Amino acid sequence: GKTTNALISTGLAMAIPYWAGVPIKDFEFVQFHPTTLFGTNILMTEGARGEGG
């Protein structure tokens, strides 16, 4: 898949305990920045989202 993350940033620190049955608490406080230019790995700024772009 496409990602703007570093290659070592896979989310396993959260996934492995979850797969082992550990309940994940306060996950709503994890921040995601998924806004990229379509078909690229170029990350858009949060300001572009705030302007409705």
Image: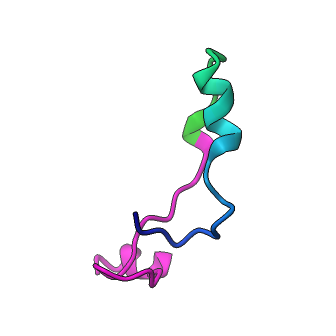
Q: Where does the image place residue 49, in percent across and percent down from the top left?
A: 38, 74
Residue drawn where x is 40% and y is 71% of the image: 35
Q: Where does the image place residue 42, in percent across and percent down from the top left?
A: 45, 85
Residue drawn where x is 49% and y is 81% of the image: 45
Q: Judge whether 27 appears above or below 50 on screen.
A: above
Is residue 36 rendered to the left or right of residue 21?
A: left
Residue drawn where x is 43% and y is 65% of the image: 34
Is residue 49 rendered to the left or right of residue 4?
A: left
Relative depth, front residue between 6 and 35 = 6
Farthest residue in the top direction? 21
Range drawn in magenta: 29-53
Q: Where does the image place residue 2, in percent across and percent down from the top left?
A: 41, 69
Q: Quadrant of residue 15?
A: top right
Relative depth, front residue between 12 and 45 = 12
Q: Quadrant of residue 26?
A: top right
Residue 52 is a magenta residue = yes
Relative depth, front residue between 3 and 32 = 3
Q: Judge whether 27 appears above or below 48 on screen.
A: above
Main structural element of the magenta stretch: helix, strand or loop?
Answer: loop
Q: Judge whether 35 appears above or below 16 on screen.
A: below
Is residue 53 rendered to the left or right of residue 42?
A: left
Residue 40 is a magenta residue = yes
Please tell me how many numbered marks the rendered image carries. 0
Question: Which quadrant, please, contains the N terminus?
Answer: bottom left
Question: Which quadrant, please, contains the C terminus?
Answer: bottom left
Residue drawn where x is 61% and y is 14% of the image: 21
Q: How is the image coloured?
A: rainbow
